[in-house]
């Protein structure tokens, strides 16, 4: 059985990714940070799903968790770096704390997870897949999101670089950049209807499962010749 780790895999987009990979027959390990109730709910919905509570910005904790997953399941075929946070604010008023929280989780969390998993994939000759979740904010920019956009742009660049570094190991590394998707992250937006009407050509937010389907495709053998790419899924919103 193929083994997949999904960070932020118990809520929102990550939950849909977990569900898609689970339905494809993967042993999925969904990583989360604090919301035990959502994690428990998902384990009840998907029997056999494994969940791990771990702050991905803590490199030592990540190393311990990934080693334990490898010892338990004997392989890791797929990593989806999905966990992310927003701490929005206008640039001149944005505190260093807001910057560092977002950098530590969105970027360094992905770095910590990728390093721990790639070490194993490379050493064990696993032709694995890594899929990173960026954002249209990282490609096109977004007012009030300098910190978030910086990390999401960096994720696209890291994806392209690692794809080249690990191509010799037959490890495919790609990126998915969603636009507005219906999750807790976008539930507080005040101008939702205006965005749908005037900003998104398809005139609706995306559904989490629509991102899940794309990620499941990139994780599959059908995507073996795709690496180092950033695929935007945004209802036609930006020119990428
Ligand atoms: N929603 C959108 O419109 C949209 C658009 C573009 C890109 N994205 C990106 O898609 C990804 C998922 O977004 P979402 O809307 O589904 O987010 P969400 O509903 O807010 O869920 C975020 C997930 O990340 C986990 N997480 C947060 N900090 C963590 C940490 N330090 N360690 C481990 N896990 C952590 C959370 O765990 P807990 O449940 O324990 O809190 C949760 O499972 C993010 O990278 C986001 O930037 C979202």
Image (spheres, rainbow, N blue to C red):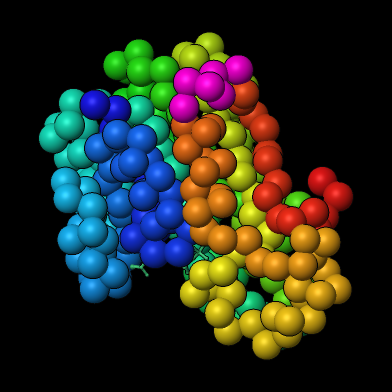
Q: Is residue 171 left or right of residue 120?
A: right
Identify the residue shown where x is 77% and y is 75%.
195
Residue 175 % position (x, y): 60, 40
Residue 21 among magenta residues: no
Q: Camera-side residue: 77 or 19?
A: 19
Q: Is residue 108 visible?
A: no
Quadrant of res 88:
bottom right
The image quarter in which residue 91 lies = bottom right
Residue 223 falls inside the magenta stretch: yes
- Give the answer, above or below, for where 136 lies relative to 166: below
Q: Position of residue 160 (x, y in %)?
A: 65, 32
Q: Which contiguous range is marked in magenta?
A: 220-225
Residue at the extreme left of the image, as rendered: 72
Instruction: Classify residue 227 by image quadrant.
Output: top right
150, 72: nearer the viewer? 72
Query: Residue at image x 74%, y 56%?
Result: 235
Q: Which residue appears at 39% of the width and 64% of the height?
A: 11
Q: Check the picture and name the quadrant holding the N terminus.
A: top left
205 to the left or right of 45: right
Q: How many marks?
A: 0
Q: Is residue 12 visible?
A: yes
In the figure, 156 relative to 167: above or below? Answer: below
Q: Looking at the picture, how far across and down is residue 143, in whole percent?
A: 78, 74
**Which residue corresponds to the image point at 56% horizontal and 24% vertical from the top-left?**
223
Residue 127 image point, x, y percent: 41, 17
Residue 204 shown left or right of residue 132 in the figure: right
């Amino acid at each position: 059985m193929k083994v997949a780790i999904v960070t932020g895999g118990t809520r929102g987009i990550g939950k849909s990714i977990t569900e898609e990979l689970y339905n494809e027959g993967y042993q999925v390990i969904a990583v989360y940070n604090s919301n035990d109730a959502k994690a428990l709910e998902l384990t009840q919905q998907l029997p056999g799903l494994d969940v791990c509570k771990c702050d991905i910005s803590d490199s030592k904790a990540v190393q311990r968790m990934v080693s334990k997953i490898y010892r338990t399941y004997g392989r890791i075929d797929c990593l989806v770096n999905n966990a992310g946070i927003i701490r929005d604010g206008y640039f001149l008023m944005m505190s260093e704390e807001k910057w560092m929280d977002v950098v530590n989780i969105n970027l360094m969390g992905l770095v910590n997870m990728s390093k721990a998993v790639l070490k194993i994939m490379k050493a064990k000759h696993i032709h694995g897949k890594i899929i990173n979740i960026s954002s249209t904010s990282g490609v096109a920019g977004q007012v009030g999101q300098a910190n978030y956009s910086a990390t999401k742009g960096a994720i696209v660049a890291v994806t392209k670089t690692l794809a080249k570094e690990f191509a010799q190991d037959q490890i495919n590394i790609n990126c998915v950049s969603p636009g507005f998707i219906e999750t807790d992250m976008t539930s507080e937006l005040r101008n939702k209807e205006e965005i749908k009407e005037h900003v998104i050509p398809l005139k609706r937010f995306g559904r989490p499962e629509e991102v899940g389907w794309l990620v499941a495709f990139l994780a599959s053998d059908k995507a073996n010749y795709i690496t180092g790419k950033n695929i935007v899924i945004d209802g036609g919103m930006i020119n990428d």
